[in-house]
Amino acid sequence: MAQEFMQWLSHPGLNHFLIVSGILFSFGIFAVLTRRNAILVLMGIELILNAANINFIAFSRYGTGTLDGQVIAIFVIILAAAEAAIALAIVLNIYQNFNTINVDEINQLRD
Amino acid sequence: MVEQLLHSLSRFLPETTLTVAVCLTVLVSLFGGRKSQATLFVALAGLALATWFSFEQIGTSESIFSGMVSVDPFSVFFKLLVGLSAILIVLFSLYSSEVQSTLHRAGEYSALLLMMTLGMFLMAGASSLLMMVLAIELTSLSSYILAGYTREASDSSEASLKYIIYGAVSTGVMLYGISILYGLTGATDFSGINRALTDESVNSVALLVSIIMILVGFGYKISAVPFHFWTPDVYEGAPITITAFLSVASKAAGFALMMRFFKVSFIDVNAIGLPAGVWTSLQGFEWHKIVAILSVLTMTLGNLVAVWQNNLKRLLAYSSIAHAGYMLMGVVVLSDKGLAAILIYFVVYLFMNLGAFYVVMLVANKTGSEDIDSYKGLGHRSPLVSVAMVIFFISLAGLPPTAGFIGKLFLFAALLDAKWVWLAVVGALNSVVSLYYYVRVVRNMFLRDPEGNAEPILFSTPQLAIVMLLLLPTLVFGLFYAPIVELANASVVMFGVR
């Protein structure tokens, strides 16, 4: 059993990448839902985006035979960088106004 | 190849114009006087030109940049809608105290507003998965910054933090869904996806998961329940000009992209004998029922929660959620008639919703408050503006003889035509609930005496002219609606759809 598993592991195919990306996606969602520090929430978002990237590249390599997926992945990397830059600027601004980056304590606006 | 590229560029003129205008606003704010409205006027000129170029595209129907973007009557319609609302927003900004008190940063404001408009123009035409993601992100990234534009105000920065967290998570989930869809079909353009889905059978569970994930992204963009949590907070915290822009243009662009994506990707063009609008490529799963439930939840929650609101911006936020619910009823049908009804509704919604927000902005400029209590006795202090507000609210509630009635009428007609009677009934009941909270504001304006300061509030002539500019279509389209119905019927044609 263990030997078969090692055998399966040593020949990576599409499924291996999909499993990794699924795990990464779940971690990302978990981080977004449980972390209270805004920076850690943003790190969770990065995990989600990179999970999608792994999917795109794996499908492009093993599935479709076109390079479209890899091109999309490059664009997504750029998007993630832009989003991180803006998000960090917003968090900095939040810190100046609230003196905290705990998302639970930033709740002036509510019903 | 080069010829094709040049031809595509010539069809891309509105977007190119906006890009040039972005560069110009940055340059003007660098070298022009830092404390001037010059950049706002540059933005106004750029938007007017781009809208004019879109207007000239009426009648074309083709796909450019090897299937990335479609220039068809459907996209031109939404470009005109977004362009018009952007022009109105810049006009509002000229009189907004939030923008005028931070004139040294007006360059940023104009450039970001133009970028947001550019993103929405691309959303209206996007016909491939990559373009879809890029357009949504361009719109969202600019709007995150603009929501926090008054950065000294803590509620504005809180709005932008909430906006970026909700926005980034939902676009992330959407991207993951898109990656699965790409893996299943091997195509990136919508018509390729359609071909792949009709030609070969794909794993239906994976397809289900991917479409639900993509629906999360769209649901966030149009603020449908249960992805609406950001809406009230962002609408309340953001500068009011940006709130108005988000509530109309951003929603319109989101709906345009959603309708094109579902219609081009999932409706079998070869299926003969089936009624138009059946989601044939997704057999075995009743998608229209899911959208119908989403629509009922959206309008009911929007209307019921709006009843308890005391801040007018927040009230209008919930009312805009409810309106997204009404328009989702058209997506349920997804026939040409349903789509045309959504387009008609958007034309009407543009004038009445922007009008309501503009009056709120004018009053907040003078009284410094958006609270419903501060509207007590406004009818005596400023009769003209108050009467305009009443008409906008009557139109939002959907009563004749205003344009809002026409919008709802065509939506319900499309629903009844497709035998969705219970949904039409729920929609009509919701309109009744909405009447209650709109009338509450009207009661405060006319039947309550002003508290404390009761001096008349005076507005300048250009400010009143803008109110009239929005008021006239709201009234005129209620009686002479034939032109917008004709325009909408001509605009449901999408490239690549039978």
Image: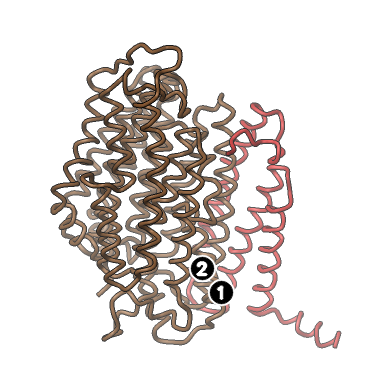
**Chain B colour?**
brown
Taking the spot 66% from the left edge, 80% from the top edge, the residue there is A13
Position of residue B207 relative to residue B354, above or below, is: below
Graded by Cα atoms within 10 Å as few (under 14), some (14 to 19) or many (20 or more), the crowding at tag 1 reads many
Lateral position of residue B291 relative to residue A93, left or right: left
Residue beneath disc 1: A59
Judging depth in this view, the residue of B491 and B461 nearest the camera is: B461
Report, in whole angstroms, how far the alpha carbon at label 2 lies from the one at label 1.
Answer: 7 Å
Quarter occupied by the N terminus of chain B: bottom left
User: Residue A5 location, x and y as percent?
Assistant: 80, 84
The numbered disc on residue B359 is none
CB under 8 Å between discs 2 and 1: yes
Q: x, y percentage for residue B377?
A: 37, 21
Residue at the right extreme of this rendering: A2
The colour assigned to chain A within the rendered structure:
red
- The residue sitting at 45% across, 29% down in the picture is B372
- Chain bearing tag 1 is A
Looking at the image, which is closer to me, B83 or B114? B83
Q: Dividing the picture into quarters, in which one does residue B104 lie?
A: top left
Of callouts 2 and 1, which one flags the residue occurring earlier in the amino acid sequence? 1
Can residue B34 be seen in the rendering of this structure? no
Q: Look at label 1 and name its amino acid.
A: Phe
In this rendering, is residue B439 above or below B11?
above
User: Which residue position holds label 2?
Assistant: A69
**Residue B42 sits above or below residue B449 on the image:** below
